[in-house]
Amino acid sequence: MERNNLGNNIQMEIMNFEEVITHLHKQSRPYSLLMGNGFSMAYDNDIFSYNALYNFLTSRDDSLINKLFDVIKTKNFELVMQQLDTTLALLRAFDSDEKLQEDILLASKKLKDGLLSSIHQLHPEHVYKIPEEKIFSCAEFLSLFTKSGGQIFSTNYDMLLYWTLMRKHVENAIDGFGREIENLDEVIQGGMAEYSDLVWGPNIEKQNVHYLHGALHIFDSGINIEKEQYDQSNFLLEKIKKRLDRGSYPIFVTAGNGDEKLSHIRHNRYLSHCFDKLSSLNGSLITFGFNFGEYDEHIIEAINKATHAQNKTPPKLWSVYIGVYSDSDAEHIRSIRSKFHAKVNLFDAKTVNVWGG
């Protein structure tokens, strides 16, 4: 076990994942999972890295999008979106030219559309493109958390989590979606039941799988939050593409800093519910593939709210275990450690066998 000294002489161990699970199991507390893009990159870095999205976006020969990445000198689409939002806010503050404001809004929309298209095109075609052994390994990993009574949170837009849960049973994993009987009066009189599409709500009380920033398969119809699903006539991505072609967009938080992301979250009842669940966690939280960057302040805020510093009874978040891949990752977490109110621990993310060998 590696030990590192912090500036305040408090030692911070870098554990391996098995040690973390063994310790938490002895504590007899639930432990939850927060995963970021590193979860998807662990499956296939060539598909799910920021570089992959950037390369696909810039290969579309859209001069405006290419120019934005060149001017801001980044491959991170979130940074570009942030710069556009900041510029627009400044223009509005100075009552600047409305045409210029409209151009920035158009650029932001083109970038978002391009991002959605990129994820759609790069994504594995359907769930059965993922090898069985990878699905099995991931399901075993996720089961660690649900069996403990914990929650699963993801900030990823892709469908790897959804597909794993769909294809392989993960004990007690419930995403809150279900079908409602639409003709209850007829059913009471002996008629055949007619069911709705998959909507969020029927299983909300038992929900323990949360897409904090939305995902490709979750749509807000204005009346219901709907989950697109696979059927025998169409693969899931084909059905999502048809929605996109009709101008229907998935619930999708991309732009802005932490405050702007939180504002977007609070304006959607599904996202707000998921965020509140993170804000009221009990036990411990393990993070995997989540780097707590400068645009993740809202996530730290939720974790701190769950900590309830003066409360010694559940629900209370007691500790956070953050997975790091490198010395620079570990140094980054040490540099922001004071932002967390709960006890922070580090573990080697490379010791987590999410997708198998």
Image (tube, rainbow, N blue to C red):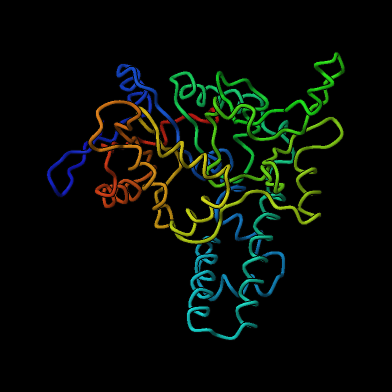
Q: Above or below — where is 270 with respect to 285? A: below
- Residue closer to the observer: 344 or 357: 344
Task: Say whether residue 356 is left or right of residue 122.
Answer: left
**x and y percent of residue 94 in the render?**
49, 84
Q: Residue furthest left?
A: 9
**x and y percent of residue 235 in the render?**
79, 37
- Residue closer to the observer: 251 or 325: 251
Q: Above or below — where is 281 with respect to 328? A: above
Task: Say whether residue 233 is left or right of residue 223.
Answer: right
**x and y percent of residue 221 in the render?**
72, 47
**x and y percent of residue 213 in the render?**
55, 47
Q: Quadrant of residue 70?
A: bottom right
Give me the residue at 46% from left, 36% from top.
277
How many marks do you count on the picture? 0
- Residue closer to the observer: 223 or 122: 223
Q: Quadrant of residue 66?
A: bottom right
Q: Above or below — where is 271 with respect to 178? A: below
